Image (spheres, rainbow, N blue to C red):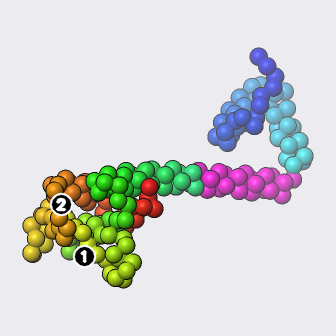
Amino acid sequence: MSNTINFKELTDLELKTLLFEGLKEAFTRQGQMAIEAIELAKVVRDEYSVSEIMEANKKAEIQIKREKENQKAKDEAERQAKLWEKKKKIALKLSEFFEGDTDLTVNVWNSNTSEKRVYLNMTSWTKRSKSPQTIACLYVTGNSKNKPMSLECNIELEDKEGLKNLLSEIGNAWNSLRLDIASAL
């Protein structure tokens, strides 16, 4: 058995358990071992002042906090990357549906009464007129005037059912969304 242990590799719990079990074993032995364990504890106490131990604890707490913050930031960055991948897929599907046109925005809207709609707008029209020019609106949940999953389309399309399916997919995947297609690509 090696007489050296790399204490830096131990977790706090492993180190605490090792110390506790080692002292417990030393005190259960007869005679000199118990006396030596007490003497070692006194040496450690004398060698390291309470303020040094408290400072070491403070540094350890700061390090743990920093590691948790770094992990949280890493997790958030991964979450954002996955979110943008989903948005990019939506943007690609809409761009392909409109034969490469990226001058579009899609909005998922919810009311206070659980009504959900998916709006598809032309971006350039919005910039010129200062108000959205809605190409299509899918009433996902419906309302008093429109049945669920009904599509209101303000442009001529050969494949209205394809657009309805695409907007339905977006409405089912998102509770709230505002996405400029060009910036997502």
Residue 146 shows in this picture: yes
- Of mark 2 and mark 1, the one earlier in the sequence is 1
User: Residue at 38% of width from left, 61% of height from top?
Assistant: 102
Left or right, residue 43 beside residue 97: right
User: Residue at 58% of width from left, 55% of height from top?
Assistant: 73
Quadrant containing the C terminus is bottom left
Sort mark 2 into few (<14), some (14-19) or many (20+) by Cα contacts within 10 Å. Answer: few
Residue 89: x %, y % from top left: 37, 50
Left or right, residue 182 beside residue 71: left
- Residue of label 2: 157
Q: Name above or below for residue 119 compared with residue 31.
A: below
Q: Which mark is residue 164?
A: none
Q: Nearer the viewer, residue 146 or 49?
A: 146
Q: Nearer the viewer, residue 56 or 160?
A: 160
Say what amino acid the circle numbered 1 marks: Asn
Say what amino acid the circle numbered 2 marks: Leu
User: Residue at 54% of width from left, 54% of height from top?
Assistant: 77
Q: Main secondary structure of the magenta part?
A: helix
Q: Name above or below for residue 116 compared with residue 184.
A: below
The part of the chain drawn in magenta is 49-71
Residue 23 shows in this picture: no
Cα separation between marks 2 and 1: 32 Å
Residue 80: x %, y % from top left: 48, 55
Q: Name above or below for residue 83 compared with residue 13.
A: below
Q: Nearer the viewer, residue 147 or 131?
A: 131
The kind of secondary structure element at disc 1 is: loop
Residue 139: x %, y % from top left: 17, 67
- Residue of label 1: 112
- Residue 171 sits in quarter: bottom left
Query: Residue at the top extreme?
Result: 1
